Amino acid sequence: MKSFLVRLLKVYISLKSYLFNEWAMYFPSHTFREFFVRRTIHSFGKKSTILMGVEIRSGKNISIGDNTIINQKVLLYGRGGKLIIGNNVDIAQETNIWTLEHDVHDDYHKSKGDDIIIEDHVWIASRVTILPGVTIGRGAVVACNSVVTKNVEELTIVGGVPAKPIGKRRSGLLYEMNYKPLFR
């Protein structure tokens, strides 16, 4: 009976923590969300912003650099490996970043995970999916609705399913992201 109560208590604590996490990310105060995020993920850089509705899973494997903007309804999934996001990165809404996936060649549908590295000054447009084991090079741009399955070279513009090079970025990357929320 005692072990059952201990297990029940653990489930209750996990569920309570999960529900709080979900609620906290929809709270309209930027300051409150930042306070919560700093305690949820491994590191969160100066002047970085996470907008409402971002979903963070296994935050202890997630690092976000300085001046980075994570827009609404983005999924950051760190369960399969480290997710490292650099400085001055712009991630648009409804993007999914997965460090864990199923192995389509495995007879038992096993999971496999790997790290994802998003280097400085990367711009990821809306509704992009990034799969495990990918590095997106400095200054690269990922077009809307793309699925990134392989590494992206520095200053390369990629798009499509799967994402393929469609151009080169001609920018000195001198900017610094500076999001100013309406309500603190």
Image (cartoon, helix red, strand yellow):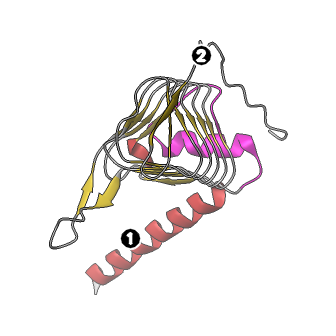
Q: Which residue is mark 2?
A: 173
Image-quadrant location for residue 69: top right
What's drawn in magenta, residue-wise?
Answer: 27-49
Please name whichever residue, 66 or 116, is drawn nearer the observer in this view of the structure. 116
Q: Provide the secondary structure element on which disc 2 rests.
A: loop
| Residue 150 position in % (x across, y down) | 34, 42
Q: Residue at x 61, y 42 (%)?
A: 125
Q: Which amino acid type is shown beneath numbered disc 2?
A: Leu
Q: In the rendered image, which quarter contains the C terminus? A: top right
Q: Please tell me which residue lies in front, 145 or 13.
A: 145
Taking 43 as reference, is 16 above or below it? below
Name the residue at 53% across, 68% down: 16
| Quadrant location of the N terminus in the rendered image | bottom left
The answer to whether 88 is drawn above or below residue 51 in the figure is: above
Q: Would you call the spot at circle 2 few (<14 residues within 10 Å), some (14-19), or many (20 or more)?
A: some
- Residue 22's tag is none
Toward the bottom, the furthest residue is: 1
Q: What distance separates the C-alpha of mark 2 from that of mark 1?
A: 48 Å
